Image: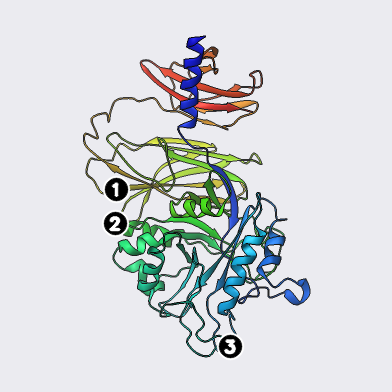
């Protein structure tokens, strides 16, 4: 009995040690009639954020919506934002939030003239702007002043607000006073957390989930990464019509313990998110226990694990791992690729101690052509890295986890190794030897609950936790 109690305690520590993160799908870039959105309000009757949130709650695979109204009015009422509407939007977001849907309200700062650009900002309870005149009944038309074209002070405002974050909106190479062509700036880096994989279609009213934009900001994103910036890959709809969550099936996907405003803000600031053309693709991208968005160090070559898990059963046509040196100014390169597989495991032996930090990100392409791009993991080698360079170390990935009826395990090992399944009492309920790198084990005969999966090859052993539902 004493042994059983000890084993249960060990299992409890093992499973609680890392917090479970869930996947939530949504969008943070959209507009209503408080600025230049709701262009179809005369026919739909919806012109306020409250109506947008109610509509979005009924969209498929859509857990959160952020309304980010343009922050200014302009002399001709375009886009038409006034200061008092900002407070109304915040209140409507709070009222629309439920246990299963998160409503948020923020702003899209800036204009699109040469050298400027738009920025989606959350975390402020007051409107940032520059209009001192020209807005009937609302002069000045801001609570916090920032000169229209001075992004240096804008990034400082965001940085100095511990709750705030900013993502770049449909960026061009000359935007933000030439951010992509300038030198790395640590203050800017602390304020900006993301670049959209795609944006829009902003001015298309279709609500059939299939109208994907032609925009693709992956190259721009890589430029900022090689400049040294720590940014994640997001996804923007930029709605101006009543099609929130339904213009296409693309999603910003965040990983958080639960769906709250605080958890979403934390996930965004930590870059625990990715951009996906698919509305329910769950990507597990790790180095050890570190996930996308993390910065880590180690004294052995990093092993990158990628799992593509789609609830619709879609297969990954390809999985690529990109890698580059942060701050080098050199575009990242593809260091590993696998075809027709939902898993990829790769060890990068090129890392050396005290080298410039490397970053790794995954790009997944599904059979139907839809793509998914993750935020990076940044890795810094430290002595005595390289000593284990040629020593074979065991590593494996498994999915899905939790599982119902079957478990896929990929080890990359082609010679003899064993797989064991151990229950909560410490009893070994399954053991089998294999000689193939990819195997499938039926779990339907096992009771629901927590287990340990142990893979053994020679003297090397690795253990992972598993939940059977």
Q: Which residue is mark 3?
A: 137
Q: Residues within 10 Å of mark 2 (few under 14, many from 20)?
A: some
Q: Nearer the viewer, residue 157 or 370?
A: 157
Q: In this figure, what is the number of numbered marks?
A: 3
Mark positioned earlier in the residue sequence (1 or 2): 2
Residue found at x 50% / y 25%: 12
Question: Answer yes or no: do the residues labelled 2 and 3 have beta carbons within 8 Å?
Answer: no
Residue found at x 62% / y 48%: 368
Provide the secondary structure element on which disc 2 rests: loop
Q: Which residue is mark 2?
A: 327
Name the mark on residue 357.
1
Provide the secondary structure element on which disc 3 rests: loop
Q: Up-down: is 30 above or below 133?
A: above
Q: Is residue 419 visible?
A: no
Mark positioned earlier in the residue sequence (3 or 1): 3
Q: Residues within 10 Å of mark 1 (few under 14, many from 20)?
A: many
Q: Quadrant of residue 87?
A: bottom right
Q: Residue furthest top?
A: 1
Mark positioned earlier in the residue sequence (2 or 3): 3
Alpha carbon distance from label 2 to label 3: 48 Å
Residue found at x 39% / y 25%: 394
Quadrant that contains the C terminus: top right
Provide the secondary structure element on which disc 1 rests: loop
Question: Answer yes or no: do the residues labelled 1 and 2 have beta carbons within 8 Å?
Answer: yes
Task: Tell me residue 147's x, y (percent).
Answer: 40, 80
């Amino acid at each position: 009995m004493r042994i059983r109690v000890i084993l249960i305690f060990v299992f409890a520590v093992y499973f609680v040690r890392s917090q479970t993160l869930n996947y939530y799908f949504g969008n943070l870039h959209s507009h209503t009639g408080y600025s230049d959105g709701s262009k179809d309000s005369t026919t739909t009757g919806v012109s306020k954020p409250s109506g947008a949130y109610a509509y979005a709650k009924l969209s498929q695979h859509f857990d959160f919506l952020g309304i980010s109204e343009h922050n200014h009015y302009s002399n001709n009422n375009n886009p038409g934002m006034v200061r008092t509407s900002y407070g109304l939007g915040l209140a409507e977001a709070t009222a629309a939030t439920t246990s299963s849907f998160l409503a948020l309200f923020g702003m899209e700062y800036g204009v699109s003239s040469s050298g400027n650009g738009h920025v989606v900002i959350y975390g402020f309870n007051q409107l940032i702007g520059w209009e001192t005149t020209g807005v009937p009944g609302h002069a000045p038309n801001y609570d916090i002043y920032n000169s229209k074209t001075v992004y240096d002070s804008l990034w400082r405002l965001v940085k100095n607000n511990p709750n705030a974050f900013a993502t770049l909106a449909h960026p061009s190479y000359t935007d933000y006073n030439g951010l992509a062509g300038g030198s790395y700036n640590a203050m800017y880096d602390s304020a900006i957390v993301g670049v959209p994989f795609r944006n829009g279609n902003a001015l298309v009213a279709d609500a059939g989930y299939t109208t994907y934009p032609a925009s693709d900001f992956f190259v721009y994103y890589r430029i900022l990464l090689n400049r040294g910036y720590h940014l994640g890959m997001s996804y923007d709809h930029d709605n101006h019509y009543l099609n929130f969550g339904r213009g296409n099936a693309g999603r910003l996907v965040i990983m958080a313990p639960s769906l709250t405003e605080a958890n979403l803000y934390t996930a965004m600031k930590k870059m625990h998110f990715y951009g996906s053309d698919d509305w329910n693709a769950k990507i597990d991208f790790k180095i050890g226990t570190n996930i996308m968005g993390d910065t880590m160090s180690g004294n052995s070559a990093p092993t990158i694990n990628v799992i593509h898990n789609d609830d619709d059963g879609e297969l990954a046509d390809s999985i690529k791992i990109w890698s580059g040196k942060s701050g080098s100014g050199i575009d990242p390169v593809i260091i590993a690729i696998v075809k027709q597989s939902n898993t990829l495991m790769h060890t990068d032996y090129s890392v050396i101690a005290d080298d410039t930090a490397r970053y790794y990100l995954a790009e997944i392409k599904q059979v139907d052509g839809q793509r998914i791009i993750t935020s990076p993991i940044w890795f810094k080698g430290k002595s005595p890295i390289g000593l284990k360079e040629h020593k074979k170390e065991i590593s494996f990935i498994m999915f899905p986890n939790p599982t119902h009826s079957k478990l896929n395990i990929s080890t990359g090992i082609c010679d003899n190794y064993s797989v064991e399944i151990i229950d909560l009492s410490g009893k070994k309920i399954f053991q089998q030897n294999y000689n193939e790198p990819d195997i499938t084990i039926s779990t339907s005969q096992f009771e629901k609950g927590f287990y340990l999966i142990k893979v053994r090859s020679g003297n090397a052993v690795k253990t992972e936790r598993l939940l059977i539902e």
